[in-house]
Image (cartoon, rainbow, N blue to C red):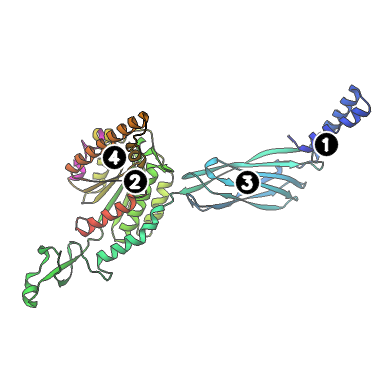
């Protein structure tokens, strides 16, 4: 039961009879009249228990976009129900327009829409629908929260999609479908053309050169149907916030751009998200299914407060990929975890695969390293410089062991990773 503003106003109006006939009898008499009115209003109000609530399916939505979710109220009772209905969602769903006026005759059904603009990735949950049924006098309401559990899946936003057209143009150029014919050193012979400055002398076809009396080189089609494994690190280091998101969010964005590009290039792309155990896996997806399955698998991922078990990671990779593949480790380049976990076992990967470590750098560290104004700023600059030196040393050690390292801010990592993939493609290393 809830009281309305009318009930408070009715009690306040009791000041008039009390002023006309002062005394406790007048006070208690007026209060009794108010209580009687409230009880009568409650008895005449339709019971919310006679309502049935159902929800209509809602499609997944990308983070930052908006959608509508609808629920239906059905009056199974014999009284007309007037009042309010509030659609309750958890805060991360970004629900708006949740309050709806209800005027529902017996036996009828009404549809009500609630807007959602999610602020967090993953499954956003509905709690229920709270209904207030007002009496004819408007003094009190009967209130009940009807269970109506539901979820809307919020997918990664894929901000780096804007880079895809330019990277696809580079890919077409690499494959010889654009006006500029520039070839990588693949293994499938494509055609012969005249030698130009900058061509590798090893590609000269001496027999064709002798026939034509001018230098001719072979061109090759870049390899297709290669294997690419994207390995997302979901350990505690991926939980660090950089800008508006976490390192894991930025790594997902880079993974989606590379997956879209590699799929268009004809390569097979797989995904494993792992720390101490596998959190998500997408394998053997068809070309049209890669991105939908990737975003679906990534939607519910959250960083875990554990260290990555790199021995287990290498074991999973080697058990799944017997032939040579491009293994992209989307993991933070933090000195201590890398030195203790990755460095001792990384040669198990580099001996069989091409390994790239793509790390999300924090621009705030570089900014902090420039501070000189105060003693506090100087100490912060010293700590930031030390962190950068440690990252440089770890990068050099990984390079010595055969790992190619990309360390870039969140907005620069996706295109740099895509460019590196195209460079490997052009060099015939895939």
Q: Nearer the viewer, residue 218 or 148?
A: 218
Q: Residues within 10 Å of mark 2 (few under 14, many from 20)?
A: some
Q: Considering only order in the chain, which callout, 2 or 3, is on the residue closer to the N terminus?
A: 3
Q: Considering only order in the chain, which callout, 1 or 4, is on the residue closer to the N terminus?
A: 1
Q: CA distance from mark 3 to mark 2?
A: 38 Å
Circle 4: element type: loop
- In this view, the mark in front (1 or 2): 2
Circle 3: element type: loop
**Which quadrant would the N terminus be assigned to in this image?**
top right
Q: Considering only order in the chain, which callout, 1 or 3, is on the residue closer to the N terminus?
A: 1
Residue 13 location, x and y as percent? 85, 33
Q: Considering only order in the chain, which callout, 2 or 4, is on the residue closer to the N terminus?
A: 4
Residue bounds of the magenta highlight: 340-350
Circle 2: element type: loop
Label disc, if present, on residue 40 of the rendered structure: 1
For the residues labelled 1 and 2, say whether their Cβ atoms are less than 8 Å apart: no
Residue 79 location, x and y as percent? 78, 46
Outermost residue toward the right in this view: 21
Q: Nearer the viewer, residue 69 or 390?
A: 390
Q: CA distance from mark 4 to mark 1?
A: 70 Å
- In this view, the mark in front (3 or 2): 2
Q: Which residue is mark 3?
A: 98
Residue 20 lies within the magenta run: no
Q: Considering only order in the chain, which callout, 3 or 4, is on the residue closer to the N terminus?
A: 3
Residue 291 location, x and y as percent? 38, 55
Q: Which residue is mark 4?
A: 333
């Amino acid at each position: 039961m809830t009281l309305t503003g009318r009930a408070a106003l009715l009690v306040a109006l009791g000041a008039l009879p009390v002023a006309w006939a002062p005394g406790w009898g007048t006070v208690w008499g007026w209060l009794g009249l108010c209580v009687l009115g409230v009880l009568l209003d409650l008895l005449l109000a339709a019971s919310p228990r006679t309502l049935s609530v159902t929800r209509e399916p809602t499609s997944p939505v990308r983070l930052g976009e908006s959608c509508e979710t609808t629920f239906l109220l059905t009056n199974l009772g014999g009284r007309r129900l007037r009042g309010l209905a509030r659609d309750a969602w958890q805060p991360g769903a970004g629900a708006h327009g949740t309050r709806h006026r209800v005027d529902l005759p017996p036996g009828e059904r009404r549809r009500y829409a609630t807007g959602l603009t999610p602020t967090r990735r993953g499954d956003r949950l509905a709690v229920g629908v709270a209904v207030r049924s007002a009496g004819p006098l408007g003094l009190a309401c009967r209130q009940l929260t009807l269970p109506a559990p539901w979820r809307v899946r919020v997918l990664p936003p894929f901000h780096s999609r804007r880079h895809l057209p330019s990277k696809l143009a580079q890919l077409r150029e690499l494959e010889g479908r654009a006006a500029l014919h520039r070839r990588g050193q693949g293994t499938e012979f494509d055609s012969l053309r005249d030698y130009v400055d900058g061509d590798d002398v090893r590609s000269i076809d001496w027999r064709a050169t002798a026939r034509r009396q001018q230098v001719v080189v072979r061109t090759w089609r870049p390899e297709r149907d290669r294997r690419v494994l994207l390995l997302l690190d979901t350990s505690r280091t991926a939980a660090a916030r950089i800008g508006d998101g976490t390192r894991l969010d930025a790594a997902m964005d880079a993974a989606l751009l590379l997956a879209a590009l590699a799929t268009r290039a004809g390569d097979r792309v797989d995904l494993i998200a792992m720390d101490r155990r596998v959190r998500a896996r997408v394998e053997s997806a068809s070309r049209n299914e890669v991105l939908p399955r990737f975003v679906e698998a990534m939607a519910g991922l959250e960083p875990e407060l554990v260290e990555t078990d790199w021995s287990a990671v290498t074991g999973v990779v080697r058990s799944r990929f017997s032939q040579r593949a491009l293994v992209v480790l989307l993991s933070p380049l933090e000195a201590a975890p890398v030195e203790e976990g990755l460095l001792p076992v990384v040669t198990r990967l580099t001996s069989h695969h091409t390994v790239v470590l793509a790390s999300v750098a924090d621009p705030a560290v570089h900014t902090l390293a420039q501070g000189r104004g105060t003693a506090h700023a100087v100490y912060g600059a010293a700590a930031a410089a030390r962190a950068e030196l440690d990252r440089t040393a770890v990068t050099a050690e990984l390079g010595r062991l055969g790992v190619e390292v990309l360390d870039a801010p969140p907005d620069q990592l996706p295109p740099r990773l895509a460019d590196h993939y195209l460079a490997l493609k052009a060099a015939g290393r895939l």
